[in-house]
Amino acid sequence: MIRTETDIQECRKLWAMFSPQQDAWDDWDLMFAFHDQDRHRPNFLVHLASDGRPDGLVPLVFDTKQERFMLMGGSYPDGRILWLLNQDFPEFFEQFPERTVLFDLRQSWVSKLLQLYPQFETNFSEQDLRYHLVPAEIGFDFHNHIDTFSSEKKQKFLYDLRKIRKREPTLRWGNENEADLFIELVNRNFGAESDYANEDDANEVRRVIGELERSGRLKTLTIEVDGARQAVSMSLLHGNNMIALYASSNNDYNNLGKLLNVECIQEACRLHVDEISFMTGMKWKADWKMKSEPCRTMRKPPAPWPATPD
């Protein structure tokens, strides 16, 4: 049997009951920062064992703007799993409302599920790649990784870095909240096409970075060129892992974004983290020969979906 919980305080208790508290995305406070209380309606699905004890949870919310159901935290977090017994998935699936989308689930978890229930394969047809590096594997120095590039690519890569460094950029590491600088840089580069031209999405960044600042998990790099801050990276330190959450640079400065990402990786190496994640998408991550692992998105019904009604 599955019941639905819509009270946010009860949802928090259920989260505490089922979350493994291992990855950053298992943390309620962080995921609640991604949660837009004006737009998202809790719709947690709780599986009950024969004795009435809760034994599985899918923490859905309804996005009233996109008119879809999704995991709490939305589309940004990646590599997630569902907190349920695999044998209960068909029952959960039956209870998933129409227009349910579960973004970027961990491939290894999905594979085990589909071995049991191959009939759901079409619902998991969308795939993306999560990119990451393991500092120990590169001797805690990104230059060792650059040495694995082809001779021509390595030469061009180092030339680009030397060229931007000739502008004598000033790098500052700290734990400051630079959400507005990030939003400003992205909007400057992409204008109306920016992901953060929409105030709802901009406010999500502000909430998330505010939570990381509050909880002491924020690692910020700003780069100043020509007397002004022209680049920023804000990363999440959770346990001994680092996630490069938000980064942007002024596109008027060639190779500044490259420098920003290199320095972020070097900081992860200095901190001796187990992994630095650059999350999903974007070709440059593959070009830099980062490690990758697939993620699969589930949709009910299978993609493609009709357009969201106006």
Image (cartoon, grey):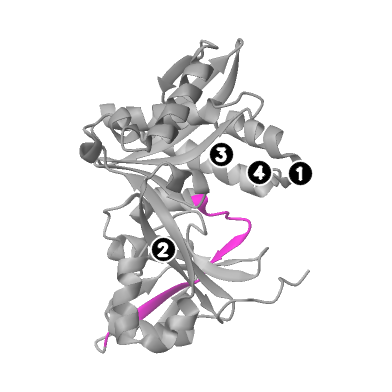
Vertical side of 246 occupied by 111: above or below: below
Residue 297 screen position, x and y as percent: 47, 69
Which quarter of the picture shows residue 11?
Answer: bottom left
**Magenta-colored stretch includes residue 48:** yes
Disc with the residue nearer the chain's start (2 vs 4): 4
Residue 12 quadrant: bottom left
- Secondary structure category for the residue under label 4: loop
Could you tell me the amino acid type at mark 1? Ala
Q: Which amino acid does label 2 sit on?
A: Cys
Disc number placed over residue 196 in the picture, else none: 4
Q: CB under 8 Å between callouts 2 and 4?
A: no
Cα distance, mark 1 to mark 4?
A: 9 Å
Of circles 1 and 3, which is in front?
A: 1
Magenta-colored span: 34-49
Kindly identify which numbered label has been placed on residue 115. none
Q: How far apart are marks 1 and 3 (CA)?
A: 19 Å
Q: Name the residue under label 3.
A: 206
Q: In the rendered structure, which amino acid carries the disc numbered 3?
A: Arg
- The x and y percentages for residue 264 are 40, 30
Question: Can residue 213 be seen?
Answer: no
Residue type, label 4: Tyr
Label 2: element kind: strand
- Ranked by sequence position, the earlier of labels 4 and 3 is 4
Q: Residues within 10 Å of mark 4 (few under 14, many from 20)?
A: many
Q: Name the residue under label 2.
A: 295
**Closer to the camera: disc 4 or disc 3?**
4
Instruction: Give me the residue at 64% from left, 31% from top.
Output: 185
Which is closer to the viewer, label 1 or label 4? 1
| Residue named by callout 1 | 192
Q: Nearer the viewer, mark 2 or mark 4?
A: 2
